[in-house]
Structures are given as C-alpha cells and as structure tokens.
Image: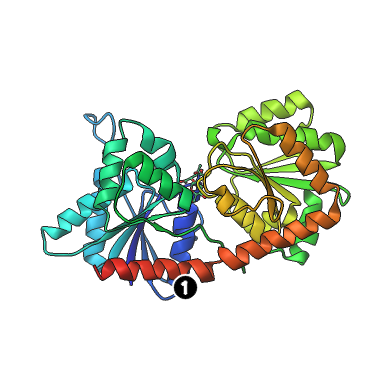
Amino acid sequence: MKIGVTCYPTYGGSGVVATELGIELAAREHQVHFITYQQPFRLTGREHGIFFHEVAVTNYPLFQYPPYDLALASRMAEVAEFYQLDLLHVHYAIPHSVSALLARQMLEAKGIRLPFITTLHGTDITLVGQDPGYLPITRFGIDQSDGVTSISEDLKRSTVRDFEITRPIEVIHNFVNCSVYQRNEDLVRELRPQYAEPHEKLILHLSNFRRVKRIDDVVEVFARIAQHVPARLMLIGDGPDRSLAEHLALKHGIQNRIHFLGKQDSVQDLLPLGDLMLMPSSMESFGLAALEGMACGVPCIATRVGGVPELVEDGINGLLYNVGDVEAMASGATALLTDPTRLSRMAAAARQTAQDKFCTTRIIPHYEAFYEKVLAG
Ligand code: GMT
C-alpha cells in the first residue's frame, strides 16, 4: 500500500506513534509518505520505503495567522496525486482531519479517490477539542473521515460522549517494538554509572512537560522517596513546566539528585537504566511513555485516569493512584523500591504485558487490516 501520513512531527505521543507506525509499515514493504511541516524527530531521513514531503507555509503581511491547514491540504492532494497514494492516515484530529477532508474533495473533483483515516490520540478530544471554538469542526472532521481509530477504549467512550459521534470507532492501542525497547544488560552496565551509583535507585519520568503531566507531582513524589531511599531522578523531555520542576528541585534542595536530560532521540537506551517510572498525569488517554518503560522492564507509578488502566494493572505490573495524591504515590514507590523481590516481579510483569498485548507484532497487523477495510469501502 502507499500511505500518506500527517502528524505533529515534534516531541509528543501522537507524533511518536505516527512515526513508529510509519517505520513498521515500511518494514512490511508498504510505501510511507510523511506530509508534515518538519521531518518527524524519530526519523533519520534514510529509512527504506519512507519519504518526507515538507509543508511550506507561505507568509504574507496580510496574514496575521498563516493558513497552515490550507497549505497542508494542498500538499496532501499534490503528494497523493503524484505518488498515487491509496489513502491518508492523519494523527490528531485538529486540524489534520479537516485538511485531509479538503484534500479528498480536491482530488474527488479530478476523479481521484483518496480515503482518509483519523486516529484520535487524546488531547485532541479531551482538551483542545473541547474548546467551543474547535468542537464543531473537530466533530465534522471525525464524522467525515473514511475510518476513525482511537488509542484506547476510554478515549473512544469520551469521543462518543462528548462529541456525540455515532459512527464506528476502531480501538487500536498504542504499541511498542519489543525488540528495540528491551533491557540490554551490556548497555545498562555501560551507561547506568553516568546517572546513579550502584546502591542508588534511578527513577524516571518521560514527557513533554505540559501541565497535564503534573511535573510538580513528579518532583514532589521524588523528594519524598529520596528521604527514605538513596535515589536519583532522570527527567527526559522538555516543555513549558520544566522551570517549575527546577524551582521545586531547588526548594527541596534535591537539584543535585536530578538529571534534566532535555529532549532525547534514543529513549530506548535510557529507559532500561531505570528502576521505576513516574507518570502522575491528570489525564492520559493511554500513556505511551509508560508502555515504552514497561517494555524495558520498568514498572510505572501512574494515575488512574483515561486509558491508563487498560495498560497498568494495579499491583501486578505497576501501581495506580488518584491524581495529586503525592503522599500515597511516594509511600507506594518507597515500599516497592525497598522490596527487591516485589520490584523484580513487577518489572517482569511489566515487560510481559508489553510483549503479550502491545507489541508491534500484534498491533501493526490490526492497522493493516483496518486500512484494507477502509479501502474496500
Ligand atoms: O500528551 C502527550 O504526550 C502528547 C499527546 C499527543 O497527542 O501528542 O499524547 C497523547 O497521545 C499518546 C499517543 O497516542 C498517548 O499515549 C497519550 O496518552 C496522549 N496524551 C494524553 O492523553 C494527555
């Protein structure tokens, strides 16, 4: 198949899923064309079967807001016609589904068929999409899609409830390549000493540091853990709340125990170094970061929100808490970190969950089957 893909190419879960899906599809001999304003960050540009088409947005003094959505629609139609794409797959409804709808109509006028699939990722429904300025157009884009997928059952329920969508929505969970994301003992021996002493525990957090991730809770929980257990915190990612984390680290006097790594390309090399991950988000439609950690044998302390319980089974492969309950999270984490038998049992269960339920070998065929279904009409 020849598939056009549009996503947000910078750091963020939906872009990661779109890019990893493109890589996996290309490895299965599909041709994948990314149509985005920038090359997606997990691509090198040299992958076999993957092409990148930049969307250039021309500015003009008249435009207070350059019309990116139109430039995108136009580029989608051009690429689809030139490369004879079979379908478009857009990740994150706003504004991608509406641009895809325009591209489909542009080609329809020329007698060319270009069905499009919209994958809902989370904040496009639970946050941004709820804005009255965006809700009607988002609902329209979803309704007009030839196929719609959601990354969790919970997100599907929210979409049906809040957007009054009646059309079918296929749930296809986030996935991880379990051969890439796994614990490599040699690498752990080589890299871990850079971040923690042998007797210290290494706690991880990976996100885009937006409000919804509750970075303040990450630091608060870590500060409490560090009072009882020799530990370090590795913060991977960057975003608006990074300075809040720095401020809290200084307030608790733990700045020397925290590694602020910023944005990283090869998180698969860093995640296996950790003993435990923290994901105290106020909302998480799935929690891809937790899945990537779990595949590396790192269980997660997470919040009982959105689609997280579809991934994290409380007490089995991780621990779940109410949003904002930093005391409970800290004491749960401390108890786990000081019980090596329970910690390693949970780490093994986390890896097992990733392998059994969310591995690429399971999920990618689901996407391929869905593409076939949409193409069949
Ligand atoms: O919150 C993010 O990290 C960004 C956001 C996005 O759309 O880029 O992530 C969402 O999509 C991920 C991949 O499908 C999910 O795993 C995340 O749970 C989801 N984030 C939220 O719902 C807050």
Residue 125 location (% of width, % of height) = 40, 42
Residue drawn at 70 percent across, 55 percent down: 316
Vertical placement of 209 versus 106: above or below?
A: above
Residue 65 location (% of width, % of height) = 29, 32
The quadrant the C terminus occupies is: bottom left
Residue drawn at 43 percent across, 36 percent down: 127
Quadrant in the rendering for residue 53: bottom left
Q: Is residue 223 visible?
A: yes
Quadrant in the rendering for residue 252: top right
The quadrant the N terminus occupies is: bottom left
Q: Which residue is mark 1?
A: 27
Q: Is residue 297 left or right of residue 179?
A: right
> Label 1: few (<14), some or many (≥20) within 10 Å?
some
Residue drawn at 73 percent across, 29 percent down: 249
Q: Is residue 266 visible?
A: no
Tell me the element at label 1: helix
